[in-house]
Image (cartoon, rainbow, N blue to C red):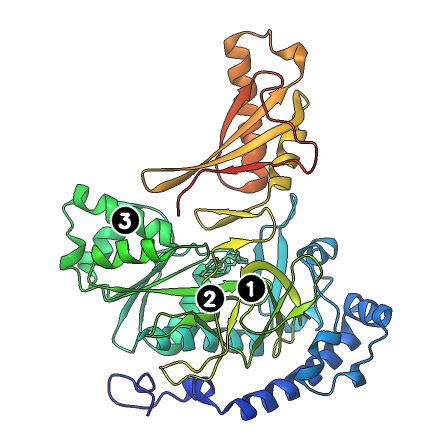
Amino acid sequence: MPHNWNDKNGHFHPASAMDFLPREELRRIQSQRLVEMVKHAYANVPLHRKRMDELGVAPEDIKSIDDIAKLPFTQKTDLRDTYPYGLFAVDMSEIVRLHASSGTTGKPIVVGYTEDDMNVWKTSVMRCLLMYGVRRGDFLQNCYGYGLFTGGMGLHCGAEELGCTVIPASGGNTERQLMLMRDFGTTAVSCTPSYFIHLIEEAPKYGIDMKSLPLRIGVFGAEPWSEQMRNFMQKNTNMRAFDIYGLSEIAGPGVGGECSEQNGLHIIEDNFYPEIVDPDTGKSLPDGEEGELVITTLSKRAMPILRYRTHDITSIINMPCKCGRTLRRIRRIGRRSDDMFIIRGVNVFPSQIEVGLMRVEECTPNYRIVLERERDLDTVTVEVEIGEQYYGDSVSALDTLRKKIQASIVNIVGIKVEVKIVQPNKIPRSDGKAKRVLDKRVI
Ligand code: DLL
């Protein structure tokens, strides 16, 4: 009997049953769901219909999950270009929730959920929490940001569904977070890994010994993190640190998570079908090979997504897992195939920064984004060259300009970045693609 099925009272949790289905049974469910979903997307979303028509694929051509590679890809730019509701497949009166995430330029991308979609999302998050060993009776302090970001509400709903005690702490305010952890008896915590490392570093200042807290499970995702970070967290607390993966376009957190083996993330495959493709050619790659993760939603009604190009680089592990789950796993995600980077859980594209810069007329398009990790916090510095004629301005005029540029970027990206006005020709020029991001962080 697989050892993670039972809750602490020895009761079987029915939601986890899907994690342990025989593969043939799982594939049957995936096939059935894909066929339905493609019909629904084709009938109700002009973009999917147009793309399928262009490829000469009709809904009837999709007979099983084996036909998935016949379908067209969906990209983040498709969500941007159809902003806000162009990919929705149901009447707006059926939408019970909206969330948003960074787009490639100034506008966010919008995602919507029907009541059924909320159930799919909640149970997917719950199944991840069950994998980590969170149970009724646990106190989960959720420090992901509440709001349009899917992290806060996503973890919240999944944890409520599970029936543990949720502490909706949201992000920020380190001192209060630590106080809650101590006084409320937090046994499980969810936040970005970098924020938790910050909490560990700050705890002594507030007289808190992380090792004396009852914390036993950490749920970390929304940005890449390494085994070294896991070891650091586990060494400085009494908890085990688990990875959770997800993205807004597909649902939010809960697309996959680690089991007690901590060896790859099980994808909730009955809802989110994973494939790996060559990031340059889009050609499907077999399990085991590294490439770009592509995900198809199998049960979403509000916004069915065909073959979404996540830009996350990983590979699929199809070997049986010791935990007994039959869901395939992906290796932990360490990098992306595009230039998006994640700062304090916020997705940032250089193109967004560029839009901010270009709204300030003194700026030239010569800029560079430098990422550093100072102590345990990530910092972003935007170095920019301004028009020659402005360099002679007084120091205070340049400082005013610097602040103006900073405000313009914050307005679009939503997080504060440092701005440095640099000498003409200081930014290295490239004869090919401009290299906009200099990442000096060691993760
Ligand atoms: O970050 C959803 C989420 C919230 C996941 C809370 C986990 C926990 P987005 O803001 O749309 O959604 O960003 C999605 O974040 O394509 C990855 O590049 C990155 N990412 C998410 N989880 C992980 C992870 C949320 N565990 C983008 N490891 C994704 C590495 C991750 N990168």
The disc placed on residue 199 is 3
Q: Quadrant of residue 169?
A: bottom left
* Gap in angstroms between the C-alphas marked 2 and 3: 27 Å
Ligand 1 neighbours mark 3 (CB distance < 8 Å): no
* Gap in angstroms between the C-alphas marked 3 and 1: 34 Å
Provide the residue designation for mark 1: 290
Badge 2 density bin: few <14, some 14–19, many ≥20, Cα 10 Å: some
State which tag comes first along the sequence, 2 or 3.
3
The residue drawn where x is 25% and y is 83% is 8
The residue drawn where x is 86% and y is 68% is 54
Badge 3 density bin: few <14, some 14–19, many ≥20, Cα 10 Å: some
* Label 2 with label 3: CB-CB less than 8 Å: no
Please name the amino acid that badge 2 sits on: Arg
* Label 1 with label 2: CB-CB less than 8 Å: yes
Disc 1 versus disc 2: nearer the observer: 1
**SS type, badge 1:** loop
Q: Identify which residue, 42 or 149, lies in the foreground.
A: 42
The residue drawn where x is 56% and y is 41% is 413
Q: Is residue 5 above or below residue 256?
A: below
* Residue 354 image position (x, y, % from top left): 64, 35
Please name the amino acid that badge 3 sits on: Leu
* Residue 298 image position (x, y, % from top left): 62, 78
State which tag comes first along the sequence, 1 or 2.
1
**SS type, badge 2:** loop
Disc 2 versus disc 3: nearer the observer: 2
State which tag comes first along the sequence, 3 or 1.
3
Q: Identify which residue, 301 or 8, lies in the foreground.
A: 8
Provide the residue designation for mark 2: 331
Disc 3 versus disc 1: nearer the observer: 1
* Residue 131 image position (x, y, % from top left): 36, 76
Please name the amino acid that badge 1 sits on: Glu
